[in-house]
Amino acid sequence: MPKSYYNNAIVGNSSMLGCLTNTGELTRLFWPNIDAPQLIDKFMVGVYCPEQRYTTMWLNEGQFIHAQKYLENTNIVETTMENYEKGLRVIQTDFCLYDSDVLVRNYDVENLSNNQLSYGLIMASSFISTNSNLSNILFDFSNESLIHYRNNIYVTISASKKAYQFQLGNKAFESAWYGELNGYDEIGMMSDGALAYHLGEFMP
């Protein structure tokens, strides 16, 4: 995927700045200052069926129709992704907390088909991109969080739901694409990882 230096939308506060494409992909994240080196190498989010392999649909890619807007009188960005062939609509809402260095991504998933479907949310990430040779990753079991770190910089990915699977390195983006993460209990001396959530059954 070619990296663009143009942003369609931004979210942030006085110390954190996130840059979004028109398909909702978070391509850059600046912290602890908005003019500091950015932290993202790549961050992909997809929807998949946890019971089947090779079902991952990356939300920023061409199988979805995208629409994006700021919610009125806010700096909250809403990106709608629709795939009528698969009967799926996802509404992604991005914003930064005004009093904490936290970027929030909320996902509303809707089954547009006539059948009951099982969905999961899967993320693949590579962070601390200013020097990938010194990047590390771990899975924090107590908080069920994926943590990218280097020196005194930590980027944590977590959710309000219980984690279903995770993976540290070992071609994490490829594993996320076919929808099965290995979940080894280790500290990864690499920059990439993946994290999955089981969202359950969705009625028509």
Image (spheres, helix red, strand yellow):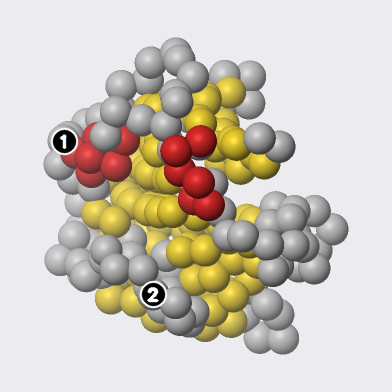
Mark 2 lies on a secondary structure that is loop
Indicate the quadrant where residue 173 lies: top left
Circles 1 and 2: CB atoms closer than 8 Å: no
Residue 78 location in percent, x, y? 52, 73
> Which circle's residue, 1 or 2, is located before the other in the chain?
2
Q: Is residue 181 left or right of residue 90?
A: left
What residue does disc 2 label? 4
Which residue is pictured at 63% across the width and 71% down the height? 11
The label number, if any, that marks residue 87 in the structure image: none
Crowding at label 1, few (<14), some or many (≥20) Cα neighbours within 10 Å? some
What kind of residue is marked 1?
Arg
Is residue 201 something one can see in this rendering? no
What residue does disc 1 label? 53
Mark 1 lies on a secondary structure that is loop
Which one is in front, 41 or 91? 41
Crowding at label 2, few (<14), some or many (≥20) Cα neighbours within 10 Å? few
- Quadrant into which the C terminus falls: bottom left
Query: Which residue appears farthest toward the bottom when viewing the image?
Result: 73
Query: Which residue appears farthest toward the right when viewing the image?
Result: 99
Q: Is residue 93 left or right of residue 3?
A: right
Seen in the picture, residue 110 relative to 190 is either above or below; the reply is below
Residue 125 location in percent, x, y? 42, 45
Residue 189 location in percent, x, y? 45, 26
Is residue 99 something one can see in this rendering? yes
- Quadrant into which the N terminus falls: bottom left
Which one is in front, 84 or 155? 155
Query: Which residue appears farthest toward the top when viewing the image?
Result: 185
Q: Marks 1 and 2: which is nearer the front?
A: 2
